[in-house]
Image (spheres, rainbow, N blue to C red):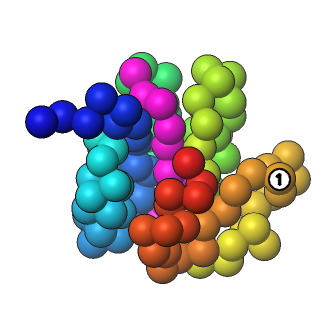
Amino acid sequence: MANQTAIRILIVEDEYLVALHLEDLLTEMGHRVLSSASRINEALHLARTCEIDFAVLDVNLSGTQSFTVAQVLRERGIPFVFATGYGSDGLIDGYHHETALRKPYEAGENLRAQ
């Protein structure tokens, strides 16, 4: 039976195993991962077009920062969190007040961020 309160989530992560682990954690929590992107252009397209409720953004996608994706999500009113090995120290001006999950993260951290 499907969870009626499942949040539709976009994952933006360039490390395949990290994305897979996060998808498993979110699915176990009863949410639905609609899509996952590993490159910035793909992430921008999905952020602009997908019907999502929430996003988890890796800050660094193979050397390109994901703040442009965050801006698209802000403009659409879609909440998001950043995922980074640096925590909030890895965020640039304009994003310091956003939630930053420190990698590696646990299921409880993702639940609190949502």
Judging from the image, what secondary structure is the residue with disc 1 in?
loop
Q: Is residue 49 placed above or below 71 in the rendered structure?
A: above
Residue 100: horizontal and vertical position, in percent?
66, 62
**Looking at this rendering, what residue extends furthest in the right direction?**
93
Please tell me whether residue 102 is drawn above or below residue 24 in the rendered image. Answer: below
Split into 4 quadrants, where in the image is the N terminus?
top left
**Residue at position x 61%, y 37% from top?**
79
The part of the image, by quadrant, that contains residue 20 is: bottom left
The amino acid type, in three-letter code, at marker 1 is: His
Q: Residues within 10 Å of mark 1 (few under 14, many from 20)?
A: few
Query: What percent of the width, then of the height, locates residue 64?
Result: 57, 57
| Residue 81 visible | yes
Residue 41 belongs to the span the image colors magenta: no
**Side (left or right) of 89 relative to 37:** right
Task: Locate residue 28: give its quadrant.
Answer: bottom left
For the point 27% across and 53% down, the residue is 27
Please say whether residue 41 is visible from this viewpoint: no
Residue bearing the label numbered 1: 97
Residue interval drawn in magenta: 51-63
